[in-house]
Image (cartoon, rainbow, N blue to C red):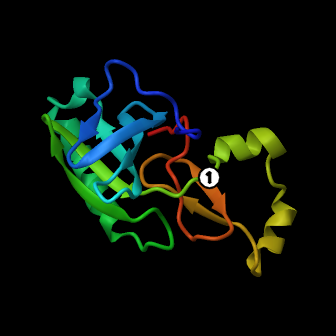
């Protein structure tokens, strides 16, 4: 049972490449991010370009450029890109998945962090804010320096 993602709709794919899709983590203007599972059982985040945009050369180029740039980012700054490809004519990007609340969930629950409090975050142990690839969301993690693609991601 998946507790941190939305259910797949009838129109959602069940598989992208070698990855079985388990639920929806977020959706934005460019695509949908799914919680997936690799053949070895590893949980992953799978971002897929919307079908309506798959035929647009400019949209595909932006998506592919994002995948290329994401591969260049140090893994301590973002979720590590594991694979990129095309499935049924739609580009996809697979990254490691680290469960955690989205920035929106954190701010909704606790309000914005006052600027004066940020200085206290400079010495460990502390949560680490990491921006996830392309989603514009962040997550706080205390045990791993990476992030999940948060629910209700915006691209």
Q: Residue furthest bottom?
A: 123
Q: Is residue 27 visible?
A: yes
63 shown above or below 88: below
Residue wearing tag 1:
100
**Number of marks in picture:** 1
Could you tell me which residue is drawn at 40 percent across and 40 percent down?
34
Observer-nearest residue: 53 or 144? 144
Mark 1, other Cα within 10 Å: few <14 / some 14–19 / many ≥20: some
Q: Position of residue 131 (x, y in %)?
A: 53, 58
Residue 119 is situated, as x and y percent measured from the top left of the image, at 81, 72
- Element under label 1? loop
* 114, above or below 20, in the image: below
Q: Using the rendered image of the protein, determine whether residue 111 is visible from the camera's viewpoint.
A: no
- In the figure, is residue 36 to the left or right of 97? left
Camera-side residue of 98 and 116: 98
Q: Considering the image in quadrants, where does the C terminus appear?
A: top left
Q: Position of residue 51 (x, y in %)?
A: 24, 27
The residue at 44%/32% (across/down) is: 28
Residue 108 sits above or below residue 137 on the image:
above
Q: Quadrant of residue 30?
A: top left
Residue 32: give x, y in percent of width and height.
Answer: 38, 35
Nearer to me, 126 or 10: 10
Q: Which residue is found at the position 64% from the left and 71% from the top? A: 143
Name the side, left or right, on which 136 lies relative to 119.
left
User: What residue is at 45 percent from the left and 62 percent from the top?
Assistant: 79
């Amino acid at each position: 049972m998946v507790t941190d993602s939305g259910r797949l709709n009838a129109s959602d794919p069940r598989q992208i490449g070698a990855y079985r899709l388990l639920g929806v983590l977020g959706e934005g203007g460019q695509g949908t991010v799914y919680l997936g599972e690799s053949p070895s059982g590893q949980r992953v985040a799978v971002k897929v370009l919307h079908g309506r945009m798959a035929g647009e050369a400019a949209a595909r180029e932006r998506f592919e450029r994002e995948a290329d740039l994401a591969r260049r980012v140090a893994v301590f700054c973002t979720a590590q890109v594991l694979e990129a490809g095309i499935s049924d004519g739609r580009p996809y990007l697979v990254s490691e998945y680290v469960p955690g609340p989205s920035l929106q969930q954190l701010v909704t629950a606790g309000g914005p962090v006052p600027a004066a409090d940020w200085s206290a975050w400079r010495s460990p142990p502390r949560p680490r804010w990491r921006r996830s690839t392309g989603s514009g969301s962040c997550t706080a993690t205390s045990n791993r320096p990476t992030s999940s693609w948060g629910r209700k991601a915006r691209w």
